[in-house]
Image (cartoon, rainbow, N blue to C red):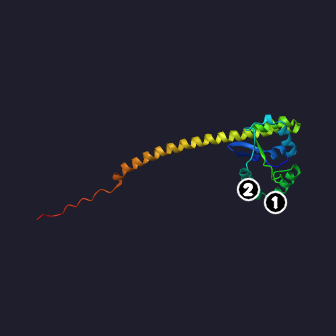
Amino acid sequence: MKTGRPIETLILNLRGQKAILDANLAELYGVPTKVFNQAVKRNEERFPIDFRFQLTPEEWLKLRSHTASSKSEMSRDEAVALNRSQIVTGSQRHRDPRYLPYVLTEHGAIMAATVLNSPQAVAMSVYVVRAFIQMREQIAANAGILKCLAQIDKTLLVHDKALRDIYQKLLPLLAPSPVSPKPMIGFEP
């Protein structure tokens, strides 16, 4: 992969779906973004809205600001290397601002590989699909863990209530007994 970043970092959560930007996918498949988008447009009937959609200006600004902040956390050398590879392939950073980027879902990424039909696109599509599957498995595992934690929390609440009841019942026993007056020694008048 030319980006130097793991595929999983290129997969974004947009509109409740896992998707990847057209420029990143084009880079993975080894073609310029312009060529990639032209191939997709020539085969638009293969890309329904659930396979490929265009970002809104608000989504694009939010994504760019998020990407800029994550790039600021990189070292200078990593940022230069990343920018150099993006410049060569016609990246999002150098995209004509009049055109909003497209994103492709898992199914759209697979379909793009069939449209491009280059050996590198076919080979990389396997990696892209595996990355989507791995992310789906991680989400399922996290959901399972959250379910177990919720069940533990519920059990703890039940135990907490039972312990409170026991404490309330033991509280009178723990209180000191009332002091009875000592009997007087001697005769009572």
In the image, residue 82 sits, relative to residue 36, either above or below, namely below
Q: Image quadrant of residue 76?
A: bottom right
User: For the residues marked 1 and 2, what is the alpha-carbon distance in whole angstroms?
Assistant: 18 Å
Secondary element under disc 1, as helix, strand or loop, is helix
Q: Amino acid at mark 1?
A: Arg
Residue 163 visible? The answer is yes
- Dot 2, crowdedness within 10 Å: few (<14), some or many (≥20)? few
Q: Which residue is the site of mark 1?
A: 76
- Dot 1, crowdedness within 10 Å: few (<14), some or many (≥20)? few
Residue 63 pos. (x, y %): 73, 52
Residue 8 pos. (x, y %): 75, 45
Q: Residue at x 73, y 54 (%)?
A: 61
Would you say the residues marked 1 and 2 are in contact, meaning their CB atoms lie under 8 Å apart? no
Secondary element under disc 2, as helix, strand or loop, is helix
Q: Image quadrant of residue 109?
A: top right
Residue 30 visible? The answer is no
Residue 100 pos. (x, y %): 78, 49
Q: Residue at x 54, y 43 (%)?
A: 152
In the image, residue 187 sits, relative to residue 36, either above or below, namely below
In the image, residue 84 sits, relative to residue 150, either above or below, namely below
Q: In terms of sequence position, does the residue under pointer 1 or pointer 2 come before the other?
A: 2
Q: Amino acid at mark 2?
A: Ser
Labelled disc at residue 41 = none
Q: Residue at x 71, y 52 (%)?
A: 58
* Residue 81 relative to residue 176: left or right: right
Q: Which residue is the site of mark 2?
A: 65
Quick one: 145 or 57, which is closer to the camera? 57
Quick one: 118 or 33, which is closer to the camera? 33
